[in-house]
Amino acid sequence: MIPAALAHLLVFLTVPPLLLGLVQRVKAIFAGRRGPPLFQVYYDLHKLLRKEAVYSRTTTWVFRAGPVVSLAAVVTGGLLVPIAGIPGPLAFSGDFILLAYLLAMARFFTVLAAMDTGSSFEGMGASREVTFGSLTEPVLFAGLLVLAVGSHSLSLSYILGPGLHDLWVRAGPALVLVAVSFAILLLAENCRIPVDDPSTHLELTMIHEVMVLDHGGPDLAFILYGAALKFFLFAAILVRLVLPVGADQPLLEAGLFLGGLLLVSVLVGTIESSMARLRLMRVPALLGGALVLATVAIAVLFSVPGAR
Amino acid sequence: MNATGLVLLGILVLLTGGALAAGCARVRGLCLGLFLASSLGGCVLAAVAGLQVLLAGAVQDWVVDWNVPAGGFHARLDALGAWYALVVGLIGAPIAVYATFHFEHASRGTLAVLAFLFNLLLGSLLLLAAAGHALLFLAAWEVATISAYFLIVLFHEKEEIRRAGRIYLFANHTGTFCLVALIALLGAGAGSLEFSALSGSARFLPASGLLLPLALIGFGTKAGILPLHIWLPHAHPAAPSPISALLSGIVIKAGIFGLLRFLAFLPPVSVSWGVVLLVLGVLSGVLGVLYALSQHDLKKLLAYHSVENIGIILIGIGVGLVGARTGSGLVAVLGFAGALLHLLNHAAFKSLLFLGAGRVVHATGTGAIDHLGGLARRMPATALLFLVGCVSICALPPFNGFVSEWSVFRAMFEQSTRGAGTAALWSVGGILGLALIGGLAAACFAKVFGAVFLGEPRARHDHGEARDAPGPQKVAMGFLALLCLLIGILPQLAIRVVWPACVQVAQSVGAQDIPDPGPVAAWLGSVSSIGLAFLSLVLAIALLSRLLLRRPSVHVGTWGCGYARPSARMQYTASSFADPLLRVFRGVLYPRIDSSRGRGSFSGSPALRSRTPDAAETWIFRPAFALLMRACAPARFLQRVPVQYQVSVVVAVLTLLLLWKVTL
């Protein structure tokens, strides 16, 4: 039990920045560049942690609390998510509700920190962040609902655990829909194209990057690390959902999981290189589409005999 | 002394203290002291009595002769009443402390009226909690309604305040009218108005199909269920802030308490009524938070959030009823536990928010969100406490709002996972609705806190004068904030306190196989340990950040992407902040924008005004009242005739009624 929890923690705390490096590498290859090293994000974090901080005279303690609370919320959320079949160390019945609200807590404090600067740019980013954030909430719950109803369990670690294989047999089509809706959610929640552009903070794309414009030094390192962790969490759920292997072969499971993470990063990089960002007022339609997919999955689950 | 006696003693303390304080309003210090001592004493006695019943489980009757036709002074503090008494006590006490220092400089007349009515309101609500007889319940209900009215119009010199008071009185008396009809019908069936007689199961009830709608309108108007909520956004901003806190925290909860109390007396409700409550709850929640998002006035915004939270409570009651009728005791008790806990939680954080808003309005002289900003540096304690309220109302862990919403969510997930048929599907809708409510509430409070407390002051008059709350008010708000945090990190204890009340409600609507609190408390224990883990992580990372920043930080102006002269008026306003979401939901809200743009080269000052009229008010109540006025127009001549004729009409009607009674 304890070794498993330690392995969970170790993977969760160390692997995530690598995924961001992978995405950057894929984008560089598409653009015909060599790109930064795969471990660039670790180097960035190391550099930022050693730097001093610059604070605006307008800001208060809320600005400094923002990155701290957000990172703490994402790390706590990670303790509820199973990684490669290892149950989350703090899993319990009803834990995914807590996970959703912990992520909301992280968003709330990032937004407040942005508004604390008094900058119109950051206010704009904050406004867009809460708009899309409040629309992703029902999508997340609709997808989780399908999984919960299908596997008769309210714990994420069980849902994505041994029962998942059987659920694919019973209600495969519903799970395909949920997987697509979660993939959209992954892009939206992690500020990826087509919702947001992580590489600029130009006015047209002002969402997440512009919110953290005034942060520097260790604060920015916390934000960057938190973003990597959040990306990893969504990727871990998606990979596990799409590649449910029996629990009796831990090595195969771990290998498949890592391969899956690699695949997700490559896919995200490919999408970012081959698509344009959507117009801002189109994003609610995309999220609405994800909600429709998940709702159809619910309908499938409730209407097909034997699916539940 | 037993619990029922204790609560009656509390009422006695409140009433005598209030009357004495009103009597010696000439001596300001004595009046305030008497008021504070008596209201605190009454609240403490009520809270102790409530806890005694909930923890020890001893329910006692207290019967006194009361010479009223069909009446009886029968007090009985059972588990449900004890929970409401506990809420009144816990929340009433800090509001009383705040009010004492809020009205420090008020005129003597105001002081006397306030001291008496404040205590009268608290006392009548406690009597409501302890009533064991329908007529006593109705009397307490009416005293509470009237005393709240006079508190709302405490500063009646302004026409808009009088108008808000009228709307409150109209709405609430329409509700009381329905309650009188409900109680009359119930009494006609049972032959007595004792609660114990009403709850007998096998009996004939006249017009049994009408009973639940009557209860819903009667109690729903007080609680503020959509579309009966229209008095809230008028009355809350009009009332002085401690009174708004009292209204939103405790008074509207009387509607929920009454509904739960009378569910036991109604004929067994079908599953579909549970679904109706669930749908009404989702509608109140979603529309309440959307209207809140579109408001420009701080207190009006908070009033709409009360509609939202009453919606969440109603979702809990609805899913509890569905669970009870479909034979799942766990769903029933989880739903009711969510509803009852949210009753306390909302009372705690909403009164905290109203008290904080009161400080903002007091310090800056305005409640217009778009004119505020940067108050966190001028009133740091109020800002911190207000932030606790914001985080709690958004149901973010580890604060109390999350605990009750978790319970409601958990009930609906349980229902949709294990339940059968359409009831499970309705729960699915409830889950999606509650998720949307959660997301929108977070957006709305990011707007409120960000625009009011963060950044720079937006209006031309800067708030350099704004001073933080005086010590006792900080203590009052701090107590409420602490309550929010404590329930959030120790939910397993809170659930054990509320459990007897949940079981009572669940049993009264016919739930079977009610589980013991063990497993639920165990789940909440996990919530508790994760909350503590989160808090310690926050501390650890903050410490790490402090250690890493060895060199002193540099302080400069906010980076404006190269723009060299940013001003406070360039900040994003609260209205622009909410605009994208209002656009997404424009099909529901119909926001209006009136703009006047000058013509020609030397145009005057252009103006832009955005507002979102309440659909229930414009589409339901205005046309309905216009119709009523037209229908009553023929009888208007009576108002113009001399008074003798008017009296003779009254006498004639009374004589006719007597004749009718005699001939029957």
Image (spheres, coloured by chain):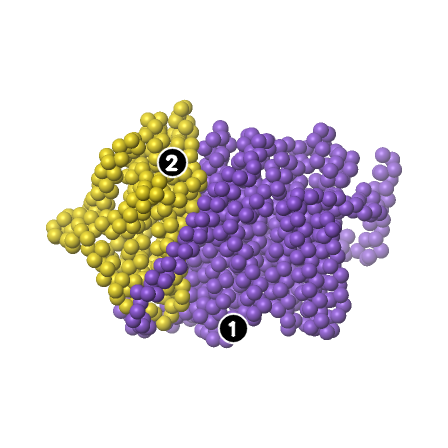
Chain colours: A yellow, B purple
The reply to whether residue A113 is in sight is no
Residue B565 in the image, given as x and y percentages of width and height: 32, 73
Mark 1 Cα shell of 10 Å, populated few (<14), some (14-19), many (≥20):
some
Chain that bears disc 1: B
Residue A223 visible at all = yes
Mark 2 residue type: Tyr
Can you tell which quarter of the image residue B555 is in? bottom left
Q: Secondary structure at mark 1?
A: loop
Name the chain letter of the residue that bears numbered label 2: A
A85 to the left or right of B318: left
Q: Residue furthest top?
A: A305
Is B569 in front, or is B215? B215
Front residue of B563/B337: it is B337
Q: What distance separates the C-alpha of mark 2 from that of mark 1?
A: 53 Å
Q: Residues within 10 Å of mark 2 (few under 14, many from 20)?
A: many
The residue positioned 29% from the left and 48% from the top of the image is A10
Q: Is residue B138 above or below residue B116?
A: above
For the residue marked with disc 1, what is the amino acid?
Answer: Arg
The label nearer to you, 2 versus 1, is 2
Residue at 59 percent of width and 46 percent of height: B497
Farthest residue, direction bottom: B465
Taking depth in this image into account, of B661 and A274 the one nearest to the observer is A274
Q: Residue B509's spot in the image, x, y percent?
A: 62, 35
- Give x and y (percent) for residue B299: 54, 60
| Residue at which label 1 appears | B467
Which circle marks residue B66 in the picture?
Answer: none
Residue visible at 71% across and 52% down in the picture: B7
Q: Relative to A96, say whether B159 is above or below.
A: below
Left or right side of B355 for B68: right
* Residue positioned 28% across, 59% down in the render: A221
Q: Position of residue A169 (x, y in %)?
A: 33, 26
According to the picture, the residue beneath numbered tag 2 turns out to be A158
